[in-house]
Amino acid sequence: MQRTHDFSAIAGAFAQRIRHAVWCNAATVDRQGRPRSRLIHPIWDGVVGYATSAVRTAKLSQIVAVPWMSLAYIAEPFRPTYIECTAVVQNDPETRHRVWDLFAHTPEPLGGDLRSAWGAVDNPDYVVIRLEPWRIELYDLLNQDQRIVWERPSA
């Protein structure tokens, strides 16, 4: 296994894996401290990810209470990608527009037109979740020497 603090060392492989998987499992923690999982479709801008959500969801209330989230891309069962991150709800107009445009200008399947889900960027039910990884693991069960872990330098 290799370890690095340099995101550029894994950026290409990370982009390839998320492009192949697109959707990932996202786990949060509920009020009783139990894990809760669901599928989300993040879009990544370098090492920072963004996902959209409706305002009144269990996911958002869980993130506000406990901002830790664990993501797993599992398109290839023997080569999953695990992302441990903090999740921050951002509902300011600048972020909403920026993420809306990021989805719109990124080719499918990673990007796409958010109007089908939210109608318009000013929909009061549309909110952005910023995903700030502190650890990304590109796992490879069959080739352990190809396994690489990136950690944010301050993690």
Image (tube, rainbow, N blue to C red):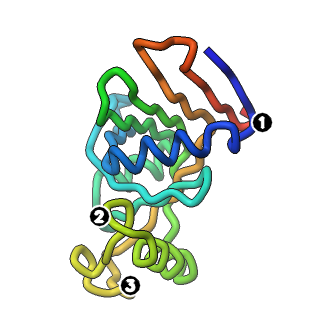
Residue position for label 2? 56
Residue position for label 3? 121
Q: What's under tag 1, amino acid-wise?
A: Ser
Residue at image location 31% in from the left, 48% down from the top:
23
Q: Residues within 10 Å of mark 2 (few under 14, many from 20)?
A: few
Secondary structure category for the residue under label 1:
loop
Mark 3–mark 1 distance (CA, rounded to whole Å): 34 Å
Q: Nearer the viewer, mark 3 or mark 2?
A: 3
Q: Position of residue 114 (x, y in %)?
A: 31, 76
Question: Which of the pair 118/30 is nearer the observer?
Answer: 118
Residue at image location 52% in from the left, 35% down from the top:
84
Q: Is residue 59 left or right of residue 4?
A: left
Q: Position of residue 83 (x, y in %)?
A: 50, 36
Question: Which of the pair 53/12 is nearer the observer?
Answer: 12
Secondary structure category for the residue under label 3:
loop
Residue at image location 38% in from the left, 67% down from the top:
111
Q: Which is nearer the N-term, disc 3 or disc 2?
A: 2
In the picture shown, does residue 48 fall above or below 124?
above
Q: What's under tag 2, amino acid-wise?
A: Arg
